[in-house]
Image (cartoon, rainbow, N blue to C red):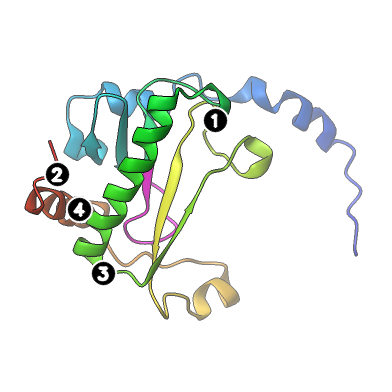
């Protein structure tokens, strides 16, 4: 294994938390009054779902509690139940709207685990299709997202409304 010696990084690691954006993106989207512009596809009393602005794939959704809470152990029993019910609802809507072959569903806890927003717990739902990988990520470290957020939003909302699920 090759090692890169970079002791200067330790000062960044220790102070990284001091450089966080003071505004939580989830709380800001939830406080907004234009769900379409904010890509909020679903709101409930305890949780909501929105499209990821920087998706790994078409239809990449985030499901989060309305309450600003960062740790899984700080979620209430009701929040945990609603989070997973809403995750199930969003997977069903993605199946109807986009017909993926599978999903990656997961949580990143803490910045070191890859959490881009470590202060607000959220679940990622990433639709996957057979053959959705190509030479682009391998050869050029580039991921091609072939659908706009606006189109993904319209298709998901239509699928939710079709089933009478959306508010």
Residue at 45% x, 58% y: name it: 56
Give the quadrant of residue 141: bottom right
Q: Are marks 1 and 2 in contact (CB under 8 Å)?
A: no
Circle 1 packing at 10 Å, graded few (<14), some (14-19), many (20+), is few
Task: Classify residue 166 as left or right of residue 135.
Answer: left
Per the image, label 3 sits on a secondary structure element best described as: loop
**Which contiguous range is marked in magenta?**
53-62
How would you classify the magenta stretch by its main secondary structure? loop
Coordinates of residue 83 in the picture (x, y in percent)? 38, 36
Element under disc 1: helix
The image quadrant where one finds the C terminus is: top left
Q: Earlier in the sequence, mark 1 or mark 2?
A: 1
- Between the C-alphas of marks 4 and 3, the distance is 11 Å
Earlier along the polypeptide chain: callout 1 or callout 4?
A: 1
Residue at the disc numbered 2: 165
Q: Is residue 146 above or below residue 68?
A: below
9, above or below 155, in the image: above
Q: Quadrant of the N terminus?
A: bottom right
Badge 3 is on which residue?
A: 99
Q: Is residue 72 visible?
A: yes
Q: Is residue 28 left or right of residue 140?
A: left
């Amino acid at each position: 294994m090759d090692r890169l010696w970079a002791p200067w990084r330790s000062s960044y690691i220790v102070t990284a938390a001091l450089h966080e954006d003071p505004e939580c993106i989830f709380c800001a989207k939830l406080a907004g009054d234009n769900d379409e512009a904010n890509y909020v596809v679903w709101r409930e009393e305890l949780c909501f779902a929105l499209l990821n602005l920087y998706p790994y794939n078409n239809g990449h959704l985030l499901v989060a509690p309305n309450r600003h809470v960062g740790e899984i152990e700080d979620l209430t029993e009701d929040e945990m139940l609603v989070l997973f019910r809403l995750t199930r609802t969003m997977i069903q809507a993605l199946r109807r709207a986009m017909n993926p072959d599978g999903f990656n569903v997961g949580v990143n806890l803490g910045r070191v685990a890859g959490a881009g927003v470590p202060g607000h717990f959220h679940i990622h739902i990433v639709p996957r299709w057979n053959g959705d990988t190509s030479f682009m990520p391998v050869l050029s470290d580039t991921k091609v997202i072939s659908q706009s957020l606006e189109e993904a939003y319209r298709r998901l909302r239509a699928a939710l409304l079709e089933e009478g699920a959306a508010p």
